[in-house]
Amino acid sequence: MRLSQKAAGLKESVIREMTRTFNARKGLPGANLAQGFPDFAAPEAMKQAAADAILNDINQYAITWGAKPLREAIATKHGRFYGYTPDPEREITVVCGSTEAMMAALITVIDPGDEVILFEPFYENYGPDTVLSGATPRYVTMHEPDWTLDETVLRAAFNDKTRALILNTPNNPTGKVFSRSEMELISELCQKHDIYVLTDEIYEHIFYEGEHLSIAEFPGMRERTITISGLSKTYSATGWRIGWLIAPPDLTDGIRRVHDFLTVGAAAPLQQGAAIALGFDDAYYDGLKTFYLQKRDYMCGVLAECGFKFRVPDGAYYVMTDFSALSPGSENDVEFALRMIQEAGVATVPGSSFYRDPATGSKKTRFTFCKKEETLILAAELLQSFARKSGILI
Ligand code: PLP
């Protein structure tokens, strides 16, 4: 069998391997804190609207770039939280999740040989997305402990081949929320070098410290920014596969053409449910923050007690940890994560999946806390007993 170079070059997602290994422990107590999907119910009103849509026979293709009520709801919600209201007819495209959104955005702006700047550690998909679109990724490291950028290195990453920069704030896996001065620097450089910004803001409503800034709002940025978000995280519906892109009309024209040939459209009845969700009142968004803040504080307390080292996340729902204290010697991140599944019953994502050089993440593992209280309490008990066996806790 001969696979294309692109297909052959893709590794299977480590997250799926962790979930498979975790599921193979059938019947044993365990908590899967690997993949970032909620294990609790999605909002009732949103589900009801989708169910009604199916029963009312909204079961055929929606308009390729998104059902009108959903595009209008996205525009209105954007206007509520940000400084402008995008035109639902010319600036919004609904797609199958932020995952398709990033791919469609890259295909829209990239030619073979172009370079794309990525911040490292990165969300697992960005490397393969970049390669699939034909670009070469250029990595800029975010430095611990605070995941800061080195201005000199960032400036030097821009060259004649740079075409786009991928930004993700609030950030997976670090929990970093990019500051105003960092966003100003990125804006300055992208304008100076005439670069597009593809900003993944899927965690836009999940932050605990500071403010979530959207780069399209910075002076001179709206015309060169593709803003990506979706239903998965804000409305706890990762399985619905609904995402969207907000971009100026000429970019949106390109995005819509790419999207049409990639997937034709997102699920029509679910778009009706999504339109209702986007209209939720402020209490919903405030509640979401409080809800995740409690989970963050609980999980960070447990992880610190069990010997993990980390920076408390300012946003998103992950904790990127260093596990050195629980694993003296040469055990690497994948070995540790597999051992933790077997011995503790807790699944995580090995750190190397967020770095270009696996060695950089070899003492790291990422936990998610987007789980119901009982799952986190069980995880705490399992981790505490694991830490006791490791001699960290008495
Ligand atoms: N972008 C980031 C940064 C993520 O962490 C995730 C999921 O974990 C996604 C995108 C996937 O989003 P979607 O479910 O909308 O495809």
Image (spheres, grey):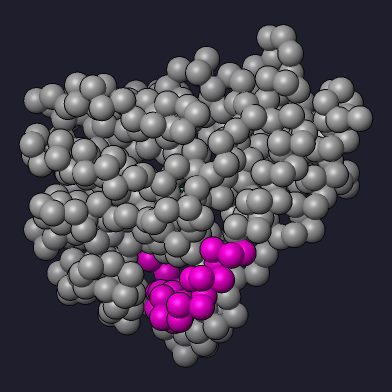
Residue interval drawn in magenta: 265-291
Number of numbered markers = 0
User: In the rendered image, which quarter contains the N terminus?
Assistant: top left
Figure check: 43 above or below 177: below
Which residue is depicted at the point 79% across and 58% down?
374
Position of 6 with respect to 258 (left or right) is right
Name the residue located 27 percent from the left edge and 42 percent from the top edge: 181
Residue 271 locus on image (x, y percent): 41, 74
Secondary structure character of the magenta stretch overall: helix
Q: Residue furthest right?
A: 394
Residue 34 can be seen in this image: no
Counting from the top left corner in percent of width and height, residue 29 is at: 86, 46
Judge whether 257 appears above or below 382 on screen.
below
Instruction: Please identify the residue farthest to the top as the structure is shown.
Output: 329
Give the left or right position of residue 375, taking residue 111 as reference: right
Q: Position of residue 255 (x, y in %)?
A: 20, 55
Left or right, residue 116 beside residue 338: left
Looking at this view, name the residue that lies furthest to the bottom.
Answer: 56
Q: Is residue 384 above or below residue 3?
A: below
Image coordinates of residue 242 in percent, x first then y, are: 42, 64
- The image quadrant where one finds the C terminus is top right
Q: Is residue 92 visible?
A: yes
**Quadrant in the rendering for residue 94:** bottom left
Query: Residue at 64% of width from left, 29% of height from top?
Result: 309
Which is nearer the eye, 92 or 23? 92
Position of residue 139 in the picture relative to residue 372 (left or right)? left
Work out whether 245 lies above or below 32.
Answer: below
Residue closest to the eye, 124 or 207: 207
Res 370 → quadrant:
bottom right
